[in-house]
Amino acid sequence: MIKKILVPLKDKSYSIIIGFKIFNKKNFFSFFNIKKKYILITNNTLLKLWSNKIIQILKKEGIKIDVISISDGEIYKSIKTVDYIIKELLKKNHGRDSVLIAFGGGVIGDITGFVASIYQRGIDFIQIPTTLLSQVDASIGGKTGVNHFLGKNMIGTFWQPKIVIIDLFFLFTLSKRELFSGFSEVIKYSISFDKKFFIWLEKKFLKLINLEKKSLLYCVQKCCKIKAKVVSLDEKEKNLRSFLNFGHTYGHAIESYTNYKKFLHGEAISIGMILASKTSEVLGLLDTQKLKRIISLFKKFHLPISPPENMSPNDYLIYMKRDKKNLLGQLRLILPNRIGEVKIYDNINEKIILSVIKSSFLQI
Ligand code: GLY
C-alpha cells in the first residue's frame, strides 16, 4: 500500500510517497521522466548495497542515469564535497535539464539539495531518503546545506525537492544505532506538537524498535504530516518552523564541539532536547514530573541522555551564540512548556544555560 502526503507550497508543492519496497513496484518509474537525465548522488556504503540495484532498475526502463558517490559521514558534508560533485557534473556535461537524486541519509539529502540549488543557478532534485531521520525530517521542507568547521549547517539554501519517495524497507537495513538516532526526531515532533503522539510512542516503543510494519508506517506518516503542515505554513522559518529546532541549539553545539565524530545527529539532539527541557524546568515552565517522563521516553529508544563529559558549560555558549535563530546577538531557545507544545524564548540569560549544563552532569 502506498500513502501520499502533499506539501502545499503553491507552485513549489510536491508529494511525499510512503510505502514498502516501492523501488520494486511498477509505479516506481512513474516518478521519473524518460526525457530527462538523472544523477544519483549517494555514498560509498550505499553504492555497494543498493544504489547499483536502483540504477539497474531505472536503466532497464530506459531512464538515463549517472552516479556520483561520496564518502559516508557528517564530516563530508562540506564545501569540499560540494566542489567535487560540481566538478563531476561538469565533466559529465550535465545541464539545467538534469535532475539530481539524493539517495541516502540526511548528509546526502542536504548536500544534494544544496548542489541542486546552486548548480547552473538551480536544477531539480528528488529525495529518496534511506534513514529514519531523513525520512521523517531532513528530506522534507527544502533545507539544504553543508557544515562549516565553525558551525553546523552554516552554509545553505531553501530549495524544495520535486518529490520525496520514502521506502520503509530501508529501515530494515539500518544499524540499531542509526535507527534509534532517527527516533530522536520522531520524539521531537511529539514533544513539540502532539501530546497524543507522545503517549502513543510511550505505548508502542517496543513495536517501533522491532520494526513492526503497521506501527512504523503510522509513525513515519504522522511525522511527515506534521512536517508538511509546518513547512507549508512557514517555509523560510520565520516563526513556526523554528519549533522543529527544539533541542537543536544545544545539540548542534555538541556536534560541532565533537567535530561530528562522536555523536550521530539524532543522538546529539536527544541530549539537546533533554537540556532544553531542563532549561524549561529551571525557568519554571515545565514541571519535574513531565521532565522525567520526557527523559524516560528517550531512554526507551536507547538514546543518550547525558552531555559529553569533556565539554564545559562555556564550550556550549561559544557555539550557541552562532545559532541561526539568534536575533540581535541574543540567545533564543525553543523550549517546551508542556508535553505537546513548545515556544520561542528570547533573551535567555547565559547564567541559566551554564547552570543547566553544570547540574546535568550531577543529576541525569
Ligand atoms: N529539520 C528542521 C527543519 O526542516 O526545519
Image (cartoon, rainbow, N blue to C red):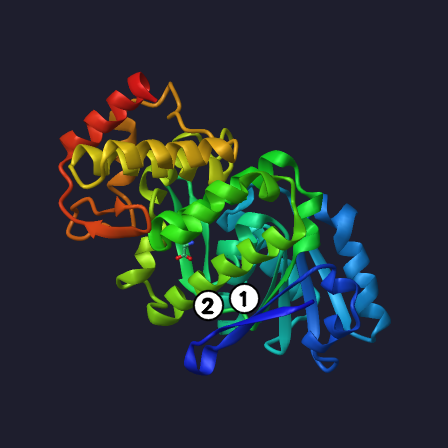
Q: Name the residue rendered at 33%, 68% in the picture.
A: 234
Q: Position of residue 331 (x, y in %)?
A: 19, 44
Q: Label 1, label 2: how many angstroms apart (C-alpha)?
A: 8 Å
Residue 133 location in percent, x, y?
A: 53, 48
Answer above or below: position of 80 versus 53.
above
Q: Secondary structure at mark 2?
A: loop
Q: Amino acid at mark 2?
A: Trp
Front residue of this view, candidates 337 and 235 = 337
Do residues under tags 1 and 2 come within 8 Å of each other at their CB atoms?
yes
Determine the quadrant in which ligand 1 lies. Answer: bottom left
Would you call the spot at circle 1 few (<14 residues within 10 Å), some (14-19), or many (20 or more)? many
Numbered tag placed on residue 303 in the rendering: none
Q: What is the crowding at mark 2: few (fewer than 14 residues within 10 Å), some, or many (at least 20)?
A: many
Looking at the picture, how far across and down is residue 4, in whole percent? 58, 71
Rendered position, 1 above or below 219: below
Q: Which three-letter amino acid code belongs to the residue tagged 1?
A: Ala
The residue sitting at 62% across, 66% down in the picture is 100
Residue 107 appears in the rendering: no
Apparent side of residue 188 relative to residue 101 in the rendered image (left or right): left
Location of mark 2 (residue): 159
**Residue 331: in sight, yes or no?**
yes
Quarter that holds the C terminus: top left
Please give the residue where the numbered disc 1 appears in the rendered image. 116
Residue shown at 41% from the left, 32% from the top: 296
The answer to whether the beta carbon of the residue marked 1 is less than 8 Å from any atom of ligand 1 is no
Secondary structure under badge 1?
helix
User: In the image, is residue 348 above or below residue 67?
Assistant: above
